[in-house]
Amino acid sequence: MPAPNWYTIQNADEIDSPSLLIYPERVKKNIQTAIRLAGGVDRLRPHVKTHKMAAVTQLMLEAGIYQFKCATIAEAEMLAQAGAADVLLAYPVVGPKIARLFTLTTTYPATRFACLIDNLATARQLADTVGTAPLSVYIDLNVGMGRTGISPTDAVQLAADCADLPGINVVGLHGYDGHIRDTDVATRTTHADAGYAQALAARQAIEQAQQKPLTLIMGGTPTSTIHANRNGERVQTSPGTFVFWDAGYAELLPDLPYDIAAVLLTRVISVIDDTTLTLDLGHKSVAAENPQPRALFFDHPDGQLTGQSEEHLVVKLPKARQHVPGEIWYGVPKHICPTVALYESVKVVENGLVTDTWPVTARVRKLTI
């Protein structure tokens, strides 16, 4: 009998489907790889929006990581509860989120919180909120993503205006270049360098005007290694997907040495005809924002995903009748981040056995604050 593959679990009959399986030894390896590629923990600020789990946060803390990036108040609170020293809420803070953020700062005083700003109106609202100390903020730069952020050339004036607001303290700049996803490393580097040049020019101008050093946070997973090589330039990188990896980035970014650490377990629920079967892996079980294939199956590379609804995934493949209802398939999601958010908890696999369950702590919009 052939040896089982690394992703195969021996007690699969006890696991309902669909389930998301996490392999902690692979997660730990990916964390160490990220630290090495960043040049040390001081230059790494991982984004937790991929995993959203207190258990994975703990693995990062045990590896020496102390500064993090997140996208929601719930993620920020999860990090604070875990004991993270430095948390950047990398998302525009408006409306009730302003009060929630300041409540975080008083509830968890051991954690240094910061957020992004890209306009003076928001900066004033933050500054006007009463806090025990000035709130640290990073100016968000639009270096080509076109989603949030101020033009780097306009950031100098925004920083000057913020200097007159005693309730906030500009401590750095943030430039996310998630639009850069070129497979060719040279092309990816050229594009990343162009955005970095804009951010660096803004930082130099602001530092010269205000006579204080600013941290620069650049990039996500695709450009993280490029920005990590900017030695001596006070740059932090903030990859997120690296912790679990996925089929999308494995295909797009073959130069990055991360391992798949999250696998979907699904089952055949119906064999329709000679070339068609259905799995219990619908929109509610794997991220559906991308075109098919939304998952790749290790043992069935010839399967073509032809239809999907909320709880069903239709697959075309030769000799479908060789498969039977209840048969287990293992697959890798195309996009792991929103896939994780579809699950209340994940199954932890060690030595071929599911041994534990980890809650997806911050998939909710609110923990306590």
Image (cartoon, rainbow, N blue to C red):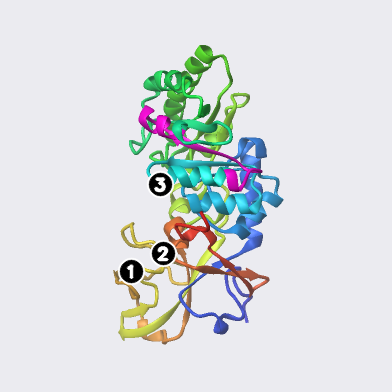
Q: Position of residue 92 (x, y in %)?
A: 41, 40
Circle 3 crowding by C-alpha within 10 Å: few under 14, some 14–19, many from 20: few
Label 3, label 1: how far apart the Cα atoms are: 42 Å
Q: Position of residue 27 (x, y in %)?
A: 62, 57
Region of the chain picked out in magenta, as a range: 106-126
Q: Amino acid at mark 1?
A: Leu
Q: Residue at x 39, y 61 (%)?
A: 287
Dot 1 corresponds to which residue?
A: 305
In which quarter of the view is residue 285 placed? bottom left
Q: Amino acid at mark 2?
A: Ala
Helix, strand or loop at label 2? It is strand
Disc nearer the start of the sequence (2/1): 2
Helix, strand or loop at label 3? It is loop
Dot 3 corresponds to which residue?
A: 96
Dot 2 corresponds to which residue?
A: 295
135 left or right, relative to 305: right
